[in-house]
Image (tube, rainbow, N blue to C red):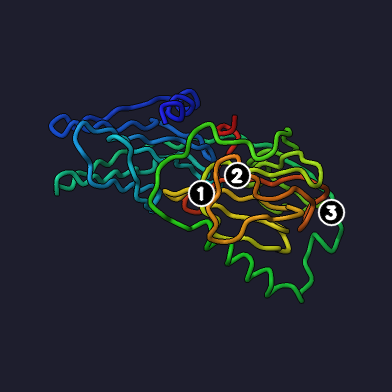
Amino acid sequence: MKRAISVLMMLLFIQTALYAAEKNITVTFPAQVEIGQPFLVSIRSESEIDSVTISWQEKECVLTGDNGTFNVLLGTDLKNAGTGTSELRISCSLNGQLLEEKRNIHLITRKYPRENLKVSPEKLTPPASLSERIKREAALGREAIQTNTPGSAPVLPLFKPVPGGYSSVYGKSRYLNGQFKGRHGGLDMRAARGSPIKATSSGTVVLTGDFWFAGKCIYIDHGAGLISFYCHMSKVSKSKGEKVKRGEVIGLSGKSGRVTGPHLHFSVSWRGEFFDPAPLLK
């Protein structure tokens, strides 16, 4: 976990420490964060902490610790674009006493590029006959990324699911056949059809499916609100409820769903907020 902290320290702008001297608790977090980017919050105590709850942008998660250290990986989604501040709240239970710290983190804008793609007309606008299926699949995906089990930040850097480079990065404004279709919420990673896809971190499979947009896909819960998402696969080799280890093969790459060619779309979210996974990968 020390390595995890050092990796994120290099990525962040300013680290600020808060001290509750009488309780020997130190909280470390960035003073400012770019929209769409991940950041780490760390809580350390010389005394035994019973529990830690983090609240960020009106969402919470419960942390598990190791030798008095509690870490959580957070982020901001592009839909929250804009400047201003957002409140970070840390609640610690220590010897039956609840201690709470509230601090503001400054959110700053970041420019993301535009991308133009060509797709077949039937892929651009799904037929009306598929509307119920697409709504059902979207609801399943939303439920999966809201999974919230106690945990802590994963070992960093994350394991790269496939070894190839990126054909499209996080945050791009996507135009399909000239029509704006939203922001890209992850990384498109180059991978020939049938290439092994590996879990970015240890966790539990919370959803698999063969969806109209995402194709064959898998969602993995890593604890503390963190979910990784892999799609457009040719094969999913794990089932809901299965435990997976960091670097374990979870399926094969492909071109299922709405795609222009074989690749892996890889996303990471915290409590439904998708942020850029690129800074977290080795």
Counting from the top left corner in percent of width and height, residue 231 is at: 69, 52
Q: Which residue is mark 1?
A: 203
Name the amino acid type tagged 3: Val
Q: For marks 3 and 2, give the CA distance.
A: 29 Å
Q: Earlier in the sequence, mark 3 or mark 2?
A: 3
For label 3, the crowd category at 10 Å Cα-Cα, with few meaning under 14, some 14 to 19 and many 20 or more, is few
Q: Residue at x 40, y 47 (%)?
A: 151
Quadrant of the image occupied by residue 134: bottom right
Residue closest to the eye, 260 or 119 = 260
> Any mark on residue 119, and which?
3
Question: Which element carries disc 1, helix, strand or loop?
Answer: strand
Q: Is residue 79 shown to the viewer in this render?
A: no
Mark in front: 1 vs 3: 1
Q: Earlier in the sequence, mark 1 or mark 3?
A: 3
- Answer above or below: position of 17 versus 154: above
Mark in front: 3 vs 2: 2
Rendered-image quadrant of the C terminus: top right
Question: Which element carries disc 2, helix, strand or loop?
Answer: loop
Q: Are marks 1 and 2 in contact (CB under 8 Å)?
A: yes
Counting from the top left corner in percent of width and height, residue 253 is at: 75, 48
Q: For marks 1 and 2, give the CA distance.
A: 8 Å
Q: Residue at x 40, y 49 (%)?
A: 57
> Any mark on residue 63, and which?
none
Name the amino acid type tagged 2: Ala
Left or right: 175, with 199 as reference point:
right
Q: Which residue is mark 2?
A: 199
